[in-house]
Image (tube, rainbow, N blue to C red):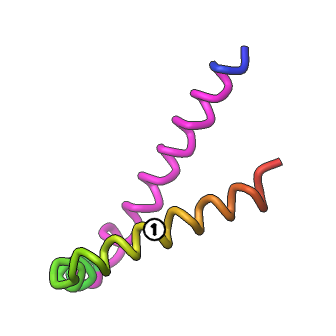
Amino acid sequence: MVAAGLWEALLGAFALMLVIEGLLPFFSPTAWRSVFERATKMSDGQIRFLGLSSMVGGVVMLFVFWP
């Protein structure tokens, strides 16, 4: 069933994202805090641009590396 395979892939991708997101605060909490403080000082437009860039980069990576 295609839908079951899709859900497994999505959950696997979400789990991998959580692992990657947890690396910086685990290995270097000081650097993570610094990055977080700088992010709180950014304007809404800057944060939206970073979000858009991240989404576009992810979509490009999916098209390049997904079989």
The percent position of residue 50, horizontal first and vertical second, equals 40, 75
Whether residue 19 sits left or right of residue 65 in the image: it is left
Can residue 21 be spotted in the picture?
A: yes
Residue occupied by mark 1: 52
In this picture, is 40 found above or below 7? below
Q: In the depicted view, which residue is nearer to us: 19 or 48? A: 48
Q: Image quadrant of residue 44?
A: bottom left
The percent position of residue 22, horizontal first and vertical second, equals 37, 61
- For the stretch drawn in magenta, the main secondary structure is helix
The percent position of residue 35, horizontal first and vertical second, equals 27, 82
Can residue 29 be spotted in the picture?
A: no
Count how many numbered circles sit on residues in the image: 1
The residue drawn where x is 42% and y is 52% is: 18
The residue drawn where x is 28% and y is 84% is: 31
The residue drawn where x is 68% and y is 63% is: 61
- For label 1, the crowd category at 10 Å Cα-Cα, with few meaning under 14, some 14 to 19 and many 20 or more, is few
